[in-house]
Image: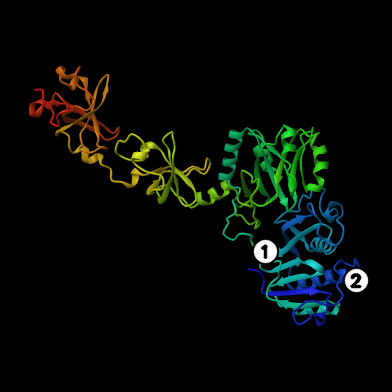
Amino acid sequence: MPPPFVYRISHYDPADRNEHGHYTGTRDTVSDRGPVEAAYLVAISAFAEASDVDRLEIREPAVTGFVHFGAAPAVAAHGLGELFPSDLTGYHDGAEVSLPVALELVRTMLRDQGAWCRLEVGDVFTLHVGWDQYIYIGSNQSCGTALARTRALGLFPERLDASPYDFVPEDPAYVQRPADADFWARLHWTVSAHHAVFLEEVFAVNASRWPRLTRHNIETVRSRLAPRAQLAIWPDLLTDIDTAVAALPDEGLLKIVREDENGQITSMVVDETQFEAVTSRLATARAAGVVSLYAGEDLPLFTAVLPDSDGVLRARWQTEPTPSDRDWAILKTLRRGQVVTGTVTTIAGFGVTFVDIGGFTAMINIPELSWRPFDHPSDVVSVGQEITAEILDVDMISERVPLSLRAVQEDPWPQVAQRIGEVAIGPVTKIVPFGVFVRIEDREDGFQGLVHTSELDESLRDVVAVGDTLSVKIVDVDLRRRRIALSHAQARTSHTWVGRVTDNEKNPVQDE
C-alpha cells in the first residue's frame, strides 16, 4: 500500500489555478539547472530525513526509446553516465541506491534527459517525478518540518490522496509468469525442439539484451541476467536477409533485431521514415528479425519475469501475455485428479479428442474415452458435446493436460468378472488366426472375449463367420490386462450351437 501522506511539490503557486484546478500562470517545464532544481533536491532530502530514509529502491526503470517525449533533448547514456557503467549494470528494478544517488536520479528526471524510474521504500516512502517539474512524495509520517522547509525554499507543497504515478498494472487480471523451475525446464524443452531461440532480456523499459540460446549455453546466460528482468523467448533470427527485409510493412512501429558478422545481437525501434536506412543496415547482417510493436502482433513464444533469489516475484511490470502465457496461467490452476467440465472441439484423424476446459485445450487419448469397446472416438463423443472428465496429469513443460472420460464412469469390468462360469450367447465379431472374438453382452459396445482355437469345436473352425452367433462359457476375466477368455467347448454341455441369419429368415439355423 502507498504511504498515507502524499504531497505534490512544485514551483507553481496554487493561487494561479482556476476554479477547475488548471494552472494558468507561467509554466517552466524544463529544469532551470539552478536554484529551483537545487530547491527541489533540498526539499526531497528534508522529506527523506523526516521519514528516516537514507536508501531507496529503484522501481520500473526506463530509458529513452525510439521517441524522446521530453521537452529537453536526450543526452548520451540517458543522463546516467556518471551513476552507472555504460551497460547500465545496477540500473534495474529492485536495485537499492543511497540517497545521494537517488537525488542524482531525480536531477536526471527533472532535466528530462532520457531516464525515469520510481524511487520507493516499501510503504514507508515514495518519490515520483512527473511531467512539468512536479514532484510527488509519499511518506508514512506527516513530515511537518519538511513541509515548512519546502515552503521556505519557495516551493509549494499540496496534500493529495495519492500520487498519479503510483504503479497500476495494465491488466490486474493477468498473472505474470515467474521465471521459475518450470519456466527454465520449458525453455530447455523449447530449445531442444527448435535447436536455437533467442532471448530478449529487458532490464529497463527500452533497454534490452538479445543472447541466442542453445542447449549448451542456457545456464550461462541465465547466470548473467539482470535481477527482475523481463524475459521473452523468440524463434531464432532469419538468416535469409531478403525474407527479413520483405517482412517490413509499409508503415508502423517496429523493433528490428540484427545480428552482425561478429555474432553481436542488437535491437532498435524504428518507424516507416527509417525503413530505407534499416534496409541498408540489414544488408550487412548475418541474421535479422522484424517485430511489430502493435498490441497483439508478433508475440514471442512465451514470457516471464525473474523472481528474487528467495523465489518471490516482486517485479510489478507486465508483458503482453502470449497464448503460451495464458495457457500457463490456466495450467497453474489445474491439478491431477481434478474433475473438469469442457466442450469437445475436435476429433482428430489419429484418434485424439481435444476438449476446451475453460480456455485451455486438453486431450483425451483413445483408451481413456470409455471402458467399453468402440470403433471410432465419434462413437463415444461428438464435437460440441459437453463432457466431464478427470485430469490425469498436468505437464507444465510441454503444456499438455491428458484427460480421462472413463475415470468418471463406473468401471464395469468387476461386474464382468462376476460372470465367470456363465454361458453366454453372442455374435462373432472378429476372426483371427488363433481364434474368434465373441460379444457376450447384448449391446453394440458390449464386451468381447476370445475363444481360442483350442476351445472351439473342431467342426466349426473352418465354417464359423463374422455375424454367426455362438454359445460360449466365460472361463476367465483378467482385470489387469482387461481380457476375457471364452470357451465354446466347455459351453457344449449346456447349450452348444452356432447360428447364421440368412436374407430370407430372421431365426438362426442351428447345427448341433
User: Tag 1's secondary structure?
Assistant: loop
Q: Is residue 58 shown to the viewer in this render?
A: yes
Say if 105 sits above or below 344 in the image. below
Quarter occupied by the C terminus: top left
- Please identify the residue farthest to the right as the structure is shown: 34
Question: Where is residue 25 shown, x and y percent of the image?
Answer: 85, 77
Residue situated in front as seen by the camera: 342 or 397 = 342
Question: Where is residue 427 shown, x and y percent of the image?
Answer: 20, 30
Q: Would residue 287 appear left or right of 335 to someone viewing this image?
A: right
User: Tag 2's secondary structure?
Assistant: helix
Number of callouts: 2
Q: Would residue 452 appear left or right of 69 to someone viewing this image?
A: left
Question: Where is residue 399 shown, x and y percent of the image?
Answer: 52, 43
Question: Where is residue 255 shown, x and y percent of the image?
Answer: 74, 46
Q: Residue at x 91, y 68 (%)?
A: 34
Of the numbered discs in the image, which one, if any, rests on residue 479? none
- Lower position in the chain sequence, tag 2 or tag 1: 2
Q: Residue at x 10, y 23 (%)?
A: 511
Name the amino acid type tagged 1.
Answer: Phe
Q: Is residue 48 shown to the viewer in this render?
A: no
* Location of mark 1 (residue): 167
Of the numbered discs in the image, which one, if any, rests on residue 35? 2
Name the amino acid type tagged 2.
Answer: Pro
Say if 451 sits above or below 186 in the image. above
Quadrant assignment, res 29: bottom right
Q: Residue at x 48, y 45 (%)?
A: 361
For marks 2 and 1, give the CA distance: 30 Å
